[in-house]
Amino acid sequence: MQLKGSPGTGLSGATLGFFVGFAAVALFGPTAETFQQVMHLTGGEVGFLVAIPSLSGSLLRIPFGAWVDANGGRKPFLVLLGLGWLGMVGLSLMVYFLYPDGMTAALYPLLLILGFLVGCAIATFSVGIGQVSYWFPQSKQGTALAMYGGLGNLAPGIFSLLLPIALSYWGLAASYLTWLLFLTIGILLYWLLGTNAYYFQLTKLGLAREQAVGKAREMGQEIFPRGLSGVEGLLQAVKIGRTWVLVAAYFITFGGFIAMTAWLPTYWYSYIGVSTVSAGVLTALYSITASLVRVWGGSLADRIGGARTGMLAGIIMLIGAIIMFSSSSYFTSVMGEMLMAAGMGTGNAAVFKIVPQAVPEAVGGASGLVGGLGAFGGFIIPPLLGFIVDLQGVQGYASGFVIYVILAGASILLMYSLSRATTDKTENPASHT
C-alpha cells in the first residue's frame, strides 16, 4: 500500500499554499486608494472595499477549517486557493482593460465581489493548521505549526515592501498580472506538494476507521478525528469550553497583530512625525518580526508547553504596550513596537500549540473557530484606538495603547487558565484518539 508524502512535505505544501494565498491580498488593499481616485468612491466605500477580503478570509476559516476533520485539508485548500485565483483573474482583467477611464462607480459592486473572492485565499490559514496538526506528533507540533503560521504570515510584510517598487516601475496593470502569475505558480506547487496525513489517505483507499487509525499510528501519526463530518466537527468544537478560551486568546494575539499592522502607519506618521515611506518600513518591520518570532515561539512551546509560553508572551506584550503608552519619541516607540511584535508572535505560536492538545477530537473545527473568530480583533480594536484619538487629539495615539495593556493582562490570565487543562490532556494520551 503506497502512501504519499511525509510530515516535511505536508508542512512545506501547506506553508507555501498559505503564503501565496496571503500574498494576493497584499496587493488588493494598498491599491484601493487608486480605485478611489478613478471611481470617485466615498471614504466609507473605500473602507468597506479594503475590509472585504479580510471579512471573507476570516469568516470562511470556520467552515473550511472544520472540513479538514472530514477530508484532511487538501481539497478545502485547493477550493479556497481556486476562489482566490478567480478573484485575481477578474481584478487583473478589470485593471488591464478598463483602468483608468473605464472604471466607474457602477463597477463598485463587481469590485467588492472580486475582493471577497481574493480574500478566500486567506482562509487557507485554518485549513493548513488542521492539515499540519494531523501530520505531526505532539512533541513537534509547536515548532511545525509556528513555522507554518510564521513563514506564511511573512507575505504581507514582504509584499508591502515590494509593492511600491512594482507599482513605480511596472504600473498597476502589470503588477496585477505579476501577482496573478505568482498565485498561479503557487497553486500548482501546492497541488504537487500538498498532501493529507496518512489516516485520511487510508480512509480514502477504503479502510475502516479502526484499521486506518492503527495503520497510521504505526507510521507515526498521533492525533485522529472522530470520523465526524465537517459540520459535526465544528459543532463538537463549539461545545468544548477550551475552544472559546483559545478564541479569546487568539483575538488578543493575532487580532491584536492585525490591528497593529493597520494602525501603525497612521501612528508613525501622525504622532511620531516620520515620512509615509518610513512609516511603511517600520510597519513592515513589525509585521516581519512578529512572523519570524512566531517560529521561535513554537519551538519554545514544544520545550516548556504552550500555556507557559503564552504567559511569557503576554508579559512581553504587556511591557511593550506600557512603553508605547508612555512613549513620545522615535526610539522608545521602536522598542515598544518590537516588544509587542515579539509578544504577539510568540503568543500566536502558543495558541496553536495548545489547540491539538486541548481539542484533539475536533482539531479542524477548533482551528477554524480560533482562526476565524480570533481574527476579528483586527476589525474591533482599530476603531477603539481611533475613538481615543478623537477624544484626546494627537496624544490619543499614545494613550490608546492602554487597550493593549488591558488585552495583554487578559492574555496572561487566559493562558494561566489553560495551563491545567492542557496538562490534563497531555497526561491522558488516550483522549487523542
Image: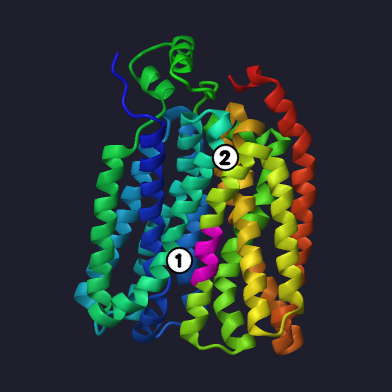
Q: Which residue is drawn at 57% across and 43% down?
A: 299
Q: Is residue 32 above or below residue 129?
A: below
The picture places residue 85, in percent across and down from the top left corner, at 30, 55
Locate residue 401 relative to residue 351 in the image: left or right. Answer: right
Amino acid bearing label 2? Gly
What element does badge 1 sit on?
helix
Locate residue 235 relative to residue 395 in the image: left or right. Answer: left
Based on the displayed image, in which of its 4 quarters is residue 329 positioned? bottom right
Label 2: few (<14), some (14–19) or many (≥20) C-alpha neighbours in 10 Å = many
Per the rendered image, the range of residues in magenta is: 284-291
Mark identifier at residue 59 = none
The residue singled out by tag 1 in the image is 157
Q: Distance between the residues labelled 2 and 1?
A: 23 Å
Locate residue 354 relative to residue 321 in the image: left or right. Answer: left
Frontmost residue, 75 versus 250: 250
The residue singled out by tag 2 in the image is 142
Frontmost residue, 305 versus 397: 305
> How many numbered discs?
2
Locate residue 428 relative to residue 82 in the image: left or right. Answer: right
* Residue 286 falls within the magenta-colored stretch: yes
User: For the C terminus, which image quadrant?
Assistant: top right
Amino acid bearing label 1? Gly
Tell which residue pokes out farthest to the left in this image: 97
Q: Is residue 209 above or below residue 405?
A: above
* Most common SS among magenta residues: helix
Q: In this view, does 352 lie above or below 172?
A: above
User: For the N terminus, which image quadrant?
Assistant: top left
Frontmost residue, 19 versus 66: 19
The picture places residue 321, in percent across and down from the top left corner, at 72, 68
Does residue 49 appear in the picture of this structure?
A: yes
Q: Which residue is drawn at 51% across and 21% down?
A: 227
